[in-house]
Image: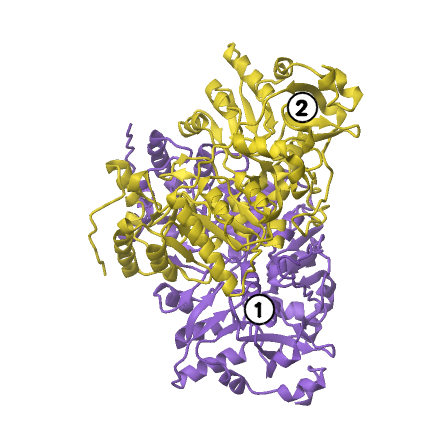
Chain colours: A yellow, B purple
Amino acid sequence: MTEKLKRIHLSELHDRVTSAEEAASWIEDGMSLGLSGFTRAGDAKAVPTALVNRAKNGEEFKVNVYTGASLGADIDKILAESGIVDKRLPFQADPVMRKAINTGEHLFIDQHLSHTAELLRAGVLEIDYAIIEGVKITEEGLLIPSTSIGNNLAFVEAAENIIIEINMAQPEQLEGIHDLYSPKPQGEREPIPLTSVEDRIGEIGIPLDLDKVKGIVFTNQLDSPSTILSPDEETQQIADHLLDFLREEIQAGRLTESLRPIQVGIGTVANAVLHGMIDSEFEDLVVYSEVLQDAVFDLMDAGKVSFASACSMTLSEEKMKEVFGNFEKYHDKLVIRPLEISNQPELIRRLGTLSINTALETDIYGNVNSTHVTGTKMMNGIGGSGDFARNARLAIFVTKSVAKGGDISSIVPFVSHVDHTEHDVDVLVTEQGFVDLRGLAPRERVPLIIENCAHPDYREQLWAYYQEALERGGQTPHVLEKAFSWHDNFMKTGTMKQKVKLEVES
Amino acid sequence: MTEKLKRIHLSELHDRVTSAEEAASWIEDGMSLGLSGFTRAGDAKAVPTALVNRAKNGEEFKVNVYTGASLGADIDKILAESGIVDKRLPFQADPVMRKAINTGEHLFIDQHLSHTAELLRAGVLEIDYAIIEGVKITEEGLLIPSTSIGNNLAFVEAAENIIIEINMAQPEQLEGIHDLYSPKPQGEREPIPLTSVEDRIGEIGIPLDLDKVKGIVFTNQLDSPSTILSPDEETQQIADHLLDFLREEIQAGRLTESLRPIQVGIGTVANAVLHGMIDSEFEDLVVYSEVLQDAVFDLMDAGKVSFASACSMTLSEEKMKEVFGNFEKYHDKLVIRPLEISNQPELIRRLGTLSINTALETDIYGNVNSTHVTGTKMMNGIGGSGDFARNARLAIFVTKSVAKGGDISSIVPFVSHVDHTEHDVDVLVTEQGFVDLRGLAPRERVPLIIENCAHPDYREQLWAYYQEALERGGQTPHVLEKAFSWHDNFMKTGTMKQKVKLEVES
């Protein structure tokens, strides 16, 4: 125990040390929990598990579960299996929970990640227990976070009660990479004083109201490793096209070779794009993102990225060993911020980010669906893509042009759910090519999206739809009764491919 | 001429005075023009008219026309009739131009109003001639704007050439109410130092690069009066419901009686909501909006509004006389800013506005269509509604529950065009009632939207759709092949009313 207690530099807190089971026993039916965790990094691991065990032992209760984003350590899985979740927000990425959401077993709110903290501050959401992972409590009463911050600061500020998980497996060297800043309530709020990706504007830990700290639990478990797949031929082509677009921007004088602060959403395609920059001519890059994946550290090793800011680090097993084993190499090139700061519209607009996010499907006018399979089933959630796309210097969406072995076209007449409107999408990239939509009216966009981005197997079909739509006219021509026929066909026949019949109505 | 020249306090500019015809003759085929004007206020009047006359006299040419928002003085009408427009952005509200857009006679880009200046600064859009109305040029070389600023500062900064219209009919007393501030390029940009609606952060006029000033034209014509209709019974009911919602927020401790800085979109319903506040208990109100309509001045007269900030003033004929005849009463309670500042996400989030905008239709999950009739035909444009709704403390959308004498339901299964997603809509209000969507999952939203907001004539039909959708499951249940059947029915039969048949598929 002595080794562990060394992590709590404030001796008056030593008697709050307790077991996960004891801490979990305090949680009552109907309560709302704010759990640390963002994209599998820095999640509270022991207390949520102990809470689920109460349900396994036959207790009946429900809680609301709020986080920064998706959780690792199978927490979302066991929460969903246990049936104790009433409402979950703002993001998840677990297959078991996904199924529970889509069958309606529990409720899910898909939210812009930057909005959660504001809703807590405004009193729209409330928190009974914040359950937060950290590596240390300082003499000054600061909780040093671990591999993510996410909504932890907002949860701690809003919560009635706080339970801390000190994770002995997370490296203590993380101390010093965090920068905790909390905007004041609206009306009293000053400008957020960050003008450069490297700026530090707050504390190195989360200030604790000691009266709220009900318990401290020790854990010893690394984060779940990232599930990112290696680049394949198509993601490589997407990366190549995207780099070609950036080169054209440099030629036009709208970008320099250090580009803009880069934000890349979580995912395999996005990670491949970053990897594509390693052997490129781009240099002196900086990252202002939500999550730092393997590729960011590879870019640092290659001397391409000089600084990176995010609200979490989500690494593969191998990369975690490498980074934590040589953390002094990275310590001064990193800052981990609250989600509310990493995803803050004010800062994204001020810095002018180059934002790259993944689309599930897009339509011929450039609207993007990031979340709903065939318009109904939740995949993961919108995450921070909307926080960035709306305010980025360049809002880029990437996707493979087809899915399910070619039976689904990612370019459709009308997206079956809209997460990003035509107003917020600058550039689309598929393995077929890219299209720059800026300054183009809807009717100018369609031919370019079809010819540059759609899969050749679907181009004729898309043209047929558009021709029929054009006969009806309008700013955004559509044949509404056929707008979702592609999705309907897929659900009924297993493919979006149809015999093309060019119908012209006058 | 002497009286007129007194408006140009910089004598070296006196020899730039010219006729509208001469100035219009400089404009060449293919050029892009930045015209002053925002919601019928402060538009360049003479030079665009003279330009149209060149086309009437048989000249063939095309230009791109960029503005702050909609124009008065029939400029959009004659531009559309003349056929000289290649591309128009970011907003318009003229019936003749609307028709030309929807038949494809000219192109139109519907843009978040806060984005235009950023696209100019980034070099995505370019301007050959800025044609800008003002009331005076000072000794220091500042152009004092008239009743709007809109994108004028951005146009003047981006333009190769500037033509100024000094409008003798606009009151010179307007001097001093403007506050011109331009953000630096991204990467060099500081926080915008505005923390209160009353703050002044810039110059009283637009700094002119004198070499760019090619001509100065004198005009003498008031703005076209506002076209806002008086409140009717239903808009009064909408206002009443909205005020009830605000009272509940005060009871819940989430608002005080001075509410939040108010933004109200242009339009009859929105204006009625403001009128509804005159006899209310709310007080010490401030306005942070795009456009100040009659009701804001009525609220000032009633002692309810102490200060108002916007980027334009659009008044009825009567109110214009009253306000300009007693301008000393209002001078120190007003500030007119660039559109980029009035609509800036950074400031809207910092101030935490109460934003009220009009929906064309909403769906059962809270997505909002602000722009496209039956998904294809442009009405006016998204305007600033997205700038505000995304970052507001409260994003409220108002609409009557039915249109066309009851044949169109404003609440539909699936909106036929998405301008504001479920992520950005907090509260819906119709004459039937209101629904607070914050903190609600999609399946929780549907019953409340149907019962509180939909017209009774359509509730059964909506329930039938939702029941069938629920059988299919999902986070956001839909019957995609019937999602647009209401719009399709309206187009084919003239009404959205159908015989309800409850189909249950398992």
- Residue A201 — which label? none
Q: Number of callouts in the render?
A: 2
User: Hey, which quadrant is residue A4 in on the image?
Assistant: top right
Camera-side residue: B335 or B399?
A: B335
Mark in front: 1 vs 2: 2
From this view, report whether residue B185 is shown above or below residue A292.
below
In-front residue for pair B66/A229: A229
Q: Position of residue B404 (x, y in %)?
A: 38, 53
Amino acid type at mark 2: Ile
Residue ID for mark 1: B41
Checking the image for residue A164, the label placed there is: 2
Category of crowding for the residue at label 1, using alpha-carbon neighbours closer than 10 angstroms: few (below 14), some (14–19), many (at least 20): many
Q: Amino acid at mark 1?
A: Ala
Q: Nearer the viewer, residue B83 or B279?
A: B83
Location of residue B152 in the rendering, given as x and y in whole percent from the top left corner: 60, 69
Q: Residue at x 79, y 28 (%)?
A: A139
B122 vs B478, left or right, is right
- Evaluate whether label 1 is on the same chain as label 2: no
Q: Is residue B373 visible?
A: no
Residue B29, percent across and down? 44, 79
Chain identifier of the residue bearing label 1 in the image: B
Left or right: where B425 falls relative to A310: left
Q: Secondary structure at mark 2?
A: strand
Q: Secondary structure at mark 1?
A: loop
Quadrant of the rendered image containing residue A321: top right
Q: Quadrant of the C terminus of chain A?
A: bottom left
Horizontal and vertical percent position of residue B501:
28, 35
